[in-house]
Amino acid sequence: MKIRVSPLILAILSASATQVLADDDLSINGFLSAGVGTLSTDDIAINGYDEDVSFKPDTVLGLQVSKHIQGKFSLTGQLVARGPEEFDLDAAWAYATYDHSDETSIRFGRLRAPFFYYSDFLEVGYAYNWIRPPAEVYRIGFSSIDGVDVTHQLYFGDIDASVQVYYGRFDDDLTIGGNDVDFDLTNFAGVVFNASMEPFAIRLSYHRAALTSEALSASAPPTDDEFLVDEDVSTFLESAFVYDDGDNQVVIELTALDHDSASLTDDTAFLVHYARRMNDFTPHITYAHEKDDVESGSTGDIQKAAGLENELVSYIAGLRYDVETNVALKIEAQYRDEKTRSAADGEDGMLYSAAIDMLF
Amino acid sequence: MNSIKQVFLASLLGTAVFTAQVQAETAVIVHPDNPSTSLAPSEISRIYLGKSKKFPNGSSVIPIDQSDSAAIRDSFLSSVMEKSASQVKSYWSKRIFTGKGTPPKQVASSAEMKELVASNPATIGYIDASEVDASVKVVYSY
């Protein structure tokens, strides 16, 4: 194609325009969610709430800085302070980006582990309808890993697609039943495929890691090697199907977790979410279900004796109200039915919660 | 007969002029040296959502947006992008906090928008059609 302007003039013009738009380079954004909630009974456990009114569990502040450094390099950092962690600062994201082309970019550093449909903006309450994603499905105890990923975007006709491949490691303590337990997930790798053709979107992902835990291995029954947690492979499969025509939104997410070590139970979990946007109001309903699959035979008997079997069901009804373009108010009622808790009959109860989500 | 014809013609012209005024309320503009002669709403939408970083001819594009409070923005979002302001906000909140991009820069007025587009061949913007002059080129209007 012939361009009347010489490349030199174009370059000069672009350079001067870049100066005009120079503040494009540094962007500072943030989000805040302030939440409150109470359980109808202390017999159940959801997100750290109890019978008394609590403000900490759903309260989170995030601050993000992005800076284009030079050429194809940029950096992004997202610091998050969470109520349940006494607002200690944690880097959810901290990575360098190399934009190989408009379609392909490489990120290196601390990244969100892209397990779920909502993983990338897990703590940005404003970006979804719930006060928090249902814990039945969003049940993995950590959300960031250290590593590298490559994302490639594709576009054909009306279809937008992307493929993300990552490799990294997670090495930290996780709190299980009030105790800190060491986890080292090595050769942690996964692939995420996204495609959307409005109003439909689909997400498929596969993740695997070799899991080692000294604390879990130490508590394993000495008679059974299957309970050791020593470079045992764990895999996670996820798929999400979304329909969003602007007025109606349906999200279905299906997941399956599989552990080679018997110290951790395999499970499956899914959710079905429907929301109806009516101007500034968005009422929504959700069904979420998680079920552990204990092993067969004597291994399964030991798992049950150790109380490793759970089955949880939740029904959630909520209302989101977009007060301003950057402010959303939410109220939610969640009925949790513990079909099985620690391999015994569970309890049931309600969680009532409210939150305000803001962006800046 | 003649007078009837004239009345008919006049009313037809009147309708045409009226229609033209209503339809040409907003003009999507680029620099006059930009080789693009027209853009489809879907192409404009992809540029403003940060999904396309280039004009169809392959040159880089910098979309410029009107301010949140400008009435012309709401009509641009609904007519060209088929989205509401809060949907666009939600879309960008996801992109921003995953480091996938930042929303287009916003300007305070149509005059500023026109000045910026007239001075930079990489930009695209939108203003009221009545404000279009030779310093910019219209690639889509509605």
Image (cartoon, grey):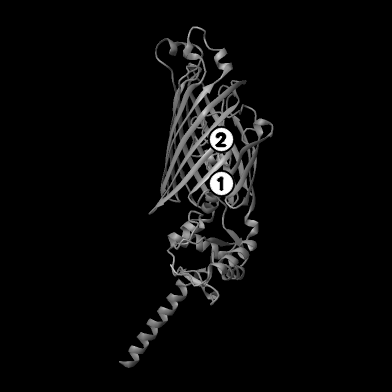
Q: Earlier in the sequence, mark 1 or mark 2?
A: 1
Q: Nearer the viewer, residue A310 or A276?
A: A310
- Is A28 on the left or on the right of A151, as rendered? right
Q: Position of residue A176 (x, y in %)?
A: 58, 22
- For the view shown, which residue lies furthest in the bottom direction? B2
Q: Amino acid at mark 2?
A: Gly
Please state which amino acid type lies under the numbered disc 1.
Answer: Tyr
**Closest to the observer: A334 or A231?**
A231
So how many labels did they put on this image?
Answer: 2
Question: Eyeballing the image, is A343 above or below A114?
Answer: above
Q: Please, which residue is most extreme toward the top here? A: A223
Quadrant for the N terminus of chain A in the image: bottom left
The image's mark for residue A147 is 2
Picture disc at residue A98: 1
In percent of width and height, residue A163 lies at 45, 42
Q: Return the chain for callout 1.
A: A
In x, y percent, where is residue B62? 55, 61
Query: Pointers 1 and 2 in contact (CB under 8 A)?
Result: no
